[in-house]
Image (cartoon, helix red, strand yellow):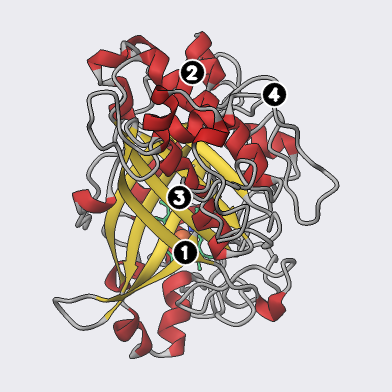
Amino acid sequence: MDKKQTESFSNKKMNRRQMLKLTGVGAAGVLIGATGFGSVASSLGYSVVEDNLSVLNKIPFYGKYQSGIYTEVQQHIYFASLNVIATSKEELKELFKMWTPMAVKMMNGEEIGEPTTNYFVPAKDTGEAVGLSASNLTLTFGVGPTLFEKSELGIKNLKPTDLVQLPHFPKDQLDENFSAGDICIQACAEDPQVAFHAVRNLVRAASGKVTLKWTQAGFNSFPQGNKKNTPRNLFAFKDGTGNPDVKNIKEMNEVVWVQPNDSVSWMTGGTYLVARKVQTHLETWDRTALGDQEATFGRHRDSGAPLGKKDEHEDMELSRSDSNGRPVVPITSHVHLAKQVKDRLLRRSFSYTSGLDPKTGIFDAGLLFISFQKDPKQFINIQNSLGRVDKLNEYITHRGSAIFACFPGIQKGSFIGESLFKA
Ligand SMILES: C=CC1=C(C)c2cc3[nH]c(cc4nc(cc5[nH]c(cc1n2)c(C)c5CCC(=O)O)C(CCC(=O)O)=C4C)c(C)c3C=C
Ligand SMILES: [Fe+2]
């Protein structure tokens, strides 16, 4: 052992209580985990951490809106849905306060605490993102309907009326193991390990306050590796073409951001996140003729153009018909049905592959569909239009469903979810 390694507890001048926290043993002698909430929280403090805009591949944490919504979509996601076991509003508030400087640091590409020199305690940061750069990490936080139903938290009166579990849709085969949750953390980054590291450290620091309910990793692939190109999903189609322009403030205000008086005041500048884990039956798809695949979406596979057109971004013109009077874009095609509703939403989805389905031996793969909208009805109306008639239904099964109210952006000196706790 070198000198650094032999640094001892006595040199650290810790009192007994601090030592018990760091060893993971509570006052009553109960083991609270290898590194419990207390140890990381107390060693981090709640000081204000600034965005370091000088680092490469850095997305600002502070702003009018949370990152990870209007941000250009990254290549990777690690999405986590959490259950809250904290038992008071104050404890919940402290949790978000603790997470705030951690989130800024990780989005700066920094460790969540000073590197540990004491070899007798676990490191503050789990370490797997050291040297990986900020990687355009974004962290988006939201709260689910079930959080407000916990009487011990006393926040029932703050629940937005629109924040209710999504209704059951025809053909849903939902599994509770991929559904709902009290809090969501959406971590997106250009590096999958950076995204995972962020969730891992936030959850680790919150030991005793939250537990993991379900998680899902996902990825996006961009043709020619160029972010200017729309990513292709596992059905090989460009996915995201019909999205609103995130740089167009008017469009974003109409579609995504909750406006004053739209909902409870703490949601102004926030948005609703819908997550649907949709399994895609790739074997069935791969036995389908290209023409039928294109008729399923209403777009050409390679170019992404509307059927009968050349360029991806040409107007779809749903009412076009061929020389026999038949609609060029089939009325049961996915895009026709999605587009015929006046509602719109911002999709920010990621493909996933999770080994095999043990019951059938086929790929367990699909789409972690994520959409942001200022009113959940936008999603509900579109999903109802797809309904039983969407040609895509033959190739997909909805397995998971969740909805979260995402807070507005965080200002420097403030903390995640402050508007909720001040309301
Ligand atoms: C209820 C909302 C939607 C679900 C669920 C959904 C699932 C789903 N979609 C694809 C692939 C594509 N979707 C495309 C367009 C599209 N999809 C929705 C909504 C849902 N999709 C909308 C609102 C739109 C845009 C319609 C428009 O206004 O143009 C496309 C076409 C290209 C594009 O615009 O992105 C593809 C491809 C999959 C694979 C899937 C579930 C597995
Ligand atoms: Fe779609």
Q: Residues within 10 Å of mark 1 (few under 14, many from 20)?
A: many
Mark 1 falls on what kind of element? strand
Whether 56 is drawn above or below 208: the answer is below
Sequence order check, earlier mark of 3 and 4: 3
Sequence order check, earlier mark of 2 and 4: 2
Q: Which residue is mark 1?
A: 218
Tell me the mark number nearer the camera, choosing from 2 and 4: 4
CB contact under 8 Å: marks 1 and 4:
no
Q: Which residue is mark 3?
A: 200
For this orientation, the residue located farthest to the right is 54
Indicate if the residue with disc 1 has its beta carbon within 8 Å of ligand 1: no
Image disc number at residue 411: 4
Q: Is residue 342 visible?
A: no
Whether 313 is drawn above or below 423: the answer is below
* CA gap, disc 1 and disc 4: 29 Å
Sequence order check, earlier mark of 1 and 4: 1
Residue at (57%, 43%) from the top-left corner?
139
Q: Is residue 129 left or right of 264 when viewed as pictured? A: right
Q: Which image quadrant is residue 391 in?
A: bottom left
Q: Amino acid at mark 3?
A: Arg
* CA gap, disc 1 and disc 3: 16 Å
Residue 48 in percent (x, y) is at: 69, 25
For this orientation, the residue located farthest to the left is 359
